[in-house]
Image (cartoon, coloured by chain):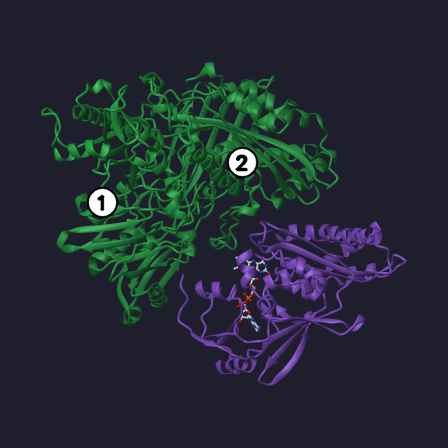
Chain colours: A purple, B green
Amino acid sequence: MKAADFLYHRAGSVAEAVTLLDEYAGEARLLAGGQSLMPMLNMRLWRLGALIDVNQVPGLDGIEVEGQGDLEATRVGALTRYASLERSPLAASRLPLLVEMVRHIGDRQVRNRGTLGGSLVQGDPTAEMPLACLVLDARVRVESGRGGREIAMGEFYHGSYAAALEFDEMVTEIRFPRHPQHFAFSELTRRHGDFCVLSVAVTGECDSDGRWHDVRIGLGGVNDMPVLAEAASARLAGTRLADDDIREAAALTQEAIDPPSDMRATAEYRAHLVPVHVRRALQQLCSKNRAADRR
Amino acid sequence: MNEFVEAPAAPKEETWQEEGLKRRLIGTSVPRTEDERLLRGDGRFTDDVQFAHQLEMAVGRCPFPHARILSIDFSKATALEGVKHILTGAQVRELSDPLTVLRPVPGAPQLPYYALAQDRATYEGQPVVSVVATSRALAEDAIELVEIEYEPLPHVSDAIEALEEGAPLLHPQSLDSNLLASNSDRAGEPEARIEEADVVIRSRMRIGRVTPLPMEPRGVVAVWRPGARELSIHTSTQVPHLVRKQLAESLRLGEECIRVSASDVGGGFGMKLGVYPEDVLASLHAMALRRPVKWIEDRMEHFRASTHGRESIHDYCLAADAEGRFVAMTNTYTTDIGGWNSPFGSSQLSSVVFTGPYRVADAAVERRVAMTNKTPVGAYRGYGQPEVNFALEVLVDRLARRLGKDPLALREMNMLRPEDLPWTVPSGAVYDSGDYVKTLHMAAEAVDYAAHRGRPRTPRADGRILGIGLSAFVERTGYASARFLANRGSKFGAHESVTLRANRSGTIDLYTGVSSIGQSSETAFAQICAEVLGVEFDAVRVHSGDTATSPLNTGAFASRTLIAAAGALREAALPFRDKTLRLGAWALGIEPGDAVIEGREVRHRSDADKRVALADVFSRAILGQGIPHDETPGLETSAHFEPPSAAFSFGTAAAVVAVDPETGEFEVERFVMVHDCGVAVNPMIVEGQVRGALVQGLGAALGEELRYDAVTGQLLSGSMLDYAVPRAADVPPIELLHTEVPSPVTTFGVRGVGEVGTIPPGAAIANAICDALADHGVELSALPVTPESVWRALEAAKAAKKGEAA
Ligand SMILES: Cc1cc2nc3c(=O)[nH]c(=O)nc-3n(C[C@H](O)[C@H](O)[C@H](O)COP(=O)(O)OP(=O)(O)OC[C@H]3O[C@@H](n4cnc5c(N)ncnc54)[C@H](O)[C@@H]3O)c2cc1C
């Protein structure tokens, strides 16, 4: 199918882009990588007054580090492409979980175009980037003609495909606090690079005495947005992630989920898989820690 | 008495070897002629064909599975600037006749399938209105402006439910139920044998609906020159001559007025076998507007508008004695043909090969064709054979487990031996020749089957359990004869044809109606022709797929092209060679018996100084100058050849699969295919064909599925987002092994090879999973096999065990 007619603007700055967004009062969309937007236009699932191309706006695709120690933060521009994240040595050392998860997105062509900001705003409940940003406790920087604000990832969605943005707002940057010491990721897909059946990302800190704290368990594809399994995390605080701890925590993840049934899997099957994958991800977290100790 | 008797395997009159010619080209992996243009981007697919003043067509489709069309108002669409012409059902009925069927289901009535729905549409995606405009986007805008009032009607999507009392009727004017037709074949007394049998395995086996999904969707460009009374059609088809015939019938034109050409075709897989509504529509618009009209199917349309494949439900019964000897086999199956008959109908070969490679004298099969409110089902690579292979081979393993026998030994005990062949199956078809057991052993050895059998089914270090599954098959390739086809009411022949024409450059133009659909026939035809003539491979130029230049033929389907064309090539090339030798000898002043063709010359067989260039010999022939007085000018031969019988390929596949018993997730770690296609004209092409089809078979086995919503009847997986076709990274490692038993019924001993890979993956993988989970008592009875279906089977087995314990 071919898209219906729309007007095309190429914005030269954030200010120009948000002014245009404001003028179209909800009838326009920003064009980033186009990997979700263009298929929707071509399939005529969306009809727009205008597209505002932000690909030429300077300064939106960098990775920068600021602060030291606990105050260290990494800032990633909204227009940073998946491929840039994949290849950046800085991202590899500062945001290793994000980089690992990027490799599970689509195929090479999609990763060459798609952007971090686009994925967050698109808000697919099975997508990798929203889950990574949630587990890594990122904050999203947003600009509009009315000024700027920051939204915590935990509050970034109203529902599936529904980011908590006003129509005149644009995401400019994603800000990550210091990366957790340990992390693991596991997902089930029907095919390599497909949208997932479910995904699990876990992070945590381990003291020198072998006790864990700040364990975060993020789940994708099992709710209308990525979620944190808070009760399960609480169960693990201060434990050594012994088998019993892990099994009980995994069972507690059921409270966080409300899985859908679709072509990829039924809700029942997803519900069965969640504790298994969480258990395995936590076991992986432990064994990575032990491997790190040996080194 | 059997209604449909195929000709028995005729003895081969004359073999290639007997002619005393040594093979130079047949059997060598000549690089494909087609590759150069395709790799350079010089292919010519339908969308590459552009004309001045060309317009584009878009089609508005019924969004419901079943609906009455109450009214159509296109006034707003007509008003849109750039919109040139709109057709609705009423006009189409005035201007054209319903689409004809090439391969009617025996006993089925003709259904009035017009290019646009009349008062009712019977599937989601059925064309209802078509618009031509200056661009495709504009035509789609116009479609959105056409106001169609529908009254949704009760629908039925499940083939079994469709045949039940009280199901909504699809075609009440032609049929008083949704059973389009049924046919049966039988031999011996299977019911009596089942009564006496020691073990009887019965099961309902379900095969999912899939789409053939060629890289190039369908497409058509229609150009009408009223002054010349010529309708010229470029289209993506496997059968240009048959499309010409069908278009003539629907458009009420003489065949002489229509030219159909299919240059490069980006895959067909059985789905491009004949005329579709859009071909008629583009022609009608072009004729009304006197301007070229193009329609290119987009991927979203493709999922609903092009024929689907496979969906069928098989109620199998396999009976054996205590030793495991098969004593009877029956299969009553229902195939889902969807909302209308398609040019090729639903698969017809399940009834031919349902007994597999096994010796069972008492067997019966009944085929019921059900109509449902879904996209019509047509031919798809395998045409009924992957379906019964899955059902039967899974049940053979189930029987082995029931009897506590080794599945390999059970197969071996029941397989037809070379000395049992030729063997007539209940449909009357004759398995020609082969060593089935040998392929079974080769596959087993390749995966170290014996060692695996002895090991317990315990999890490896990664928590997964390894299983091995086998699937043995016999595959019908080609058609028996025109007589056989006539018995079944088919509207096409069993022959292939070629024309060879000498040109003044000293090369040979070879004309064939077979279009290039990825099967590499241009390469294989040139190899055979050059072999027989004695010229170099690149002295033969193949021109394919144009009805204006090629002799009338049948087409590229049913793994039949080479089976029939090999004979035509030989029979056209022999007189061509003889005349070349006579003219060459005359030019050299030697006896024709002393002349040979070598490279680009005719020369004396022992006197190297006596030689004349082919360019010279051919020029003499073309001009009629410098040739013997008793020779006619020109050097051009044509031949039509019909093979005396179908040839049956065969083989065994083995899959090694690691299964996670906690989640049902699994991975195919190895897939071995042992295969025999008789004499391989080009081993590299054979390998490509087998691999390509295996990937399609693996896709259908592991994830591809067109699923319809149980309530709304709407297609749930109608895009590349939801339809899980495998990509390169998803294909497991494939190992190919070949045997080469020449077929006695074909020229050069070839057997077909285009479809075979689609057949065994489903059963081999399901059997491997059941083997891995044998201690859990898991059984699988449906394709596709997914992690979730394995998990569900595990849960069902657990529940059954609990039930037993309680
Ligand atoms: C074949 C294929 C496979 C895919 N597989 C996966 C997968 O496995 N996992 C996965 O997560 N994704 C997958 N995707 C989706 C892909 O990740 C998209 O790139 C992503 O969802 C959107 O990013 P984009 O930059 O392309 O955004 P666009 O498509 O350009 O935009 C998406 C939406 O975000 C809005 N938007 C974009 N940037 C901003 C901004 N800075 N501020 C405010 N609004 C903005 C747009 O207006 C639009 O509404 C796949 C896509 C394809 C085509």
Query: Alpha carbon of mark 1 to alpha carbon of mark 2: how far?
Result: 40 Å
Going from the N terminus, do you reach mark 1 or mark 2 first? 1
* Residue B611 image offset from top left, x and y in percent: 24, 26
Residue B442 seen in render: yes
* Residue B212 image offset from top left, x and y in percent: 44, 45
Q: Decide: marks 1, 2 in contact (CB < 8 A)?
A: no
Chain that bears disc 2 = B
**Same-chain check, marks 1 and 2:** yes
Is B172 in front, or is B619? B619
Q: Which residue is mark 2?
A: B761
Question: Which residue is at 37% across, 54% downward?
Answer: B297
Is B661 in front, or is A128? A128
Is A241 in front, or is B370? A241
Drawn side of residue A162 relative to residue B678, left or right: right
Residue that extends furthest to the front in the rendered view of this protein: B609
- Ligand 1 within 8 Å of the CB at mark 2: no
Q: Element at badge 1?
A: helix
Give the vertical position of B333 relative to B726 (above or below): above
Label 2 CA crowd tier, 10 Å (few <14, some 14–19, many 20+): many
Give the vertical position of B461 relative to B323 (above or below): below
Drawn side of residue B440 relative to residue B482, left or right: right
* Residue B616 image offset from top left, x and y in percent: 20, 33
Number of the label disc, if any, that sits on residue B249? 1
